Image (tube, rainbow, N blue to C red):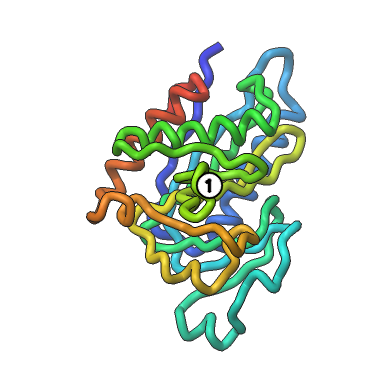
Amino acid sequence: MEKKIIFKDLKTIDYKEAWDYQEKLFNKVLDEKSHKVNNESSDNYLLFCEHPHVYTLGKSGAVNNLLINDDFLKKINATFYKIDRGGDITYHGPGQIVGYPILDLDNFNLHLKKYIFSIEQAIIDTLKDYSIEASRLEGATGVWLDVNNKNKTRKICAIGVRASHWVTMHGFAFNINTNLDYFNYINPCGYTDKGVTSLEKELGRKIDIEEVKNKLRIHIADIFEANII
């Protein structure tokens, strides 16, 4: 059976609005899954977007990893949400590709660990298109550079997922032309000894974010052996 993923680019969208939309699709897929007959396939979705400045804290995160108070949040035009994904604190903002795959993993014969591995691989393959060697860091999710040099190890993509009955939501944040100053106000993903980077910083030039989105879609389709429509 051909695997299909319905793609939507939400462009720049408020974090809460995107979260509510994710929940709507997530619940739709769960409902389809609970009522499907025989080998029927429930729908799968992939959302891309950018958010205005926002910090999100996962359910296992520590609130003291946000290093600023409400007044300073307002000063830098940022908001803060405690949310229901795994992981600790991260930042979303302009110039970042935020991806929300809402997938029924049973359609892809994947368990959760392999699913996260697959998302990481799609990012790694996209970075390879820009001649950047990226990899995983043992004991941490996401995509990293220079993992063999503790003094230079830095994250370029964060991943945080929620799953129920093997249906996923939330996803990844891939730094393209991101203002990295906003990471100074948190301990990113709970780390105090790891840096953060972007494609722009690594290449020393502004990047066409639409070009990156197109490359990333192709790699996600390849990794998941799916037709993205």
Q: Residue at x 46, y 30 (%)?
A: 220
Q: Which residue appears at 50% of the width and 71% of the height? A: 184
Callout 1: 10 Å neighbours few (<14), some, many (20+)?
many
Q: Position of residue 208 (x, y in %)?
A: 25, 49
The relative height of residue 151 versus residue 219 in the rendered view (above or below) is below
Q: Assign the C terminus to one quadrant of the image.
A: top left
Position of 223 relative to 38 (above/below): below
Residue 95: where, in percent of width, then height? 36, 58
Which x, y percent locates residue 60?
75, 57
Identify residue type, mark 1.
Answer: Phe
Name the residue nearer the viewer: 79 or 2.
79
Residue 33 in sight in this render: yes
Secondary structure of residue under mark 1? strand
Q: Residue furthest left?
A: 205
Q: Residue at coordinates 65% horizontally, 39% vertically from top-left?
A: 168
Q: Quadrant of residue 106?
A: top right
Q: Nearer the viewer, residue 177 or 17?
A: 177
Please determine whether, in this image, residue 130 is positioned above or below residue 156.
above
Residue at numbered disc 1: 172
- Is residue 52 rendered to the left or right of residue 32? left
Q: Quadrant of the N terminus?
A: top right
Q: Residue at x 51, y 14 (%)?
A: 2
Q: Is residue 98 left or right of residue 129?
A: right
Report the number of discs: 1
Q: Is residue 24 visible?
A: no
Where is residue 43, by image quadrant?
top right
User: How far across and how far down the image is residue 127, in percent?
Assistant: 37, 38
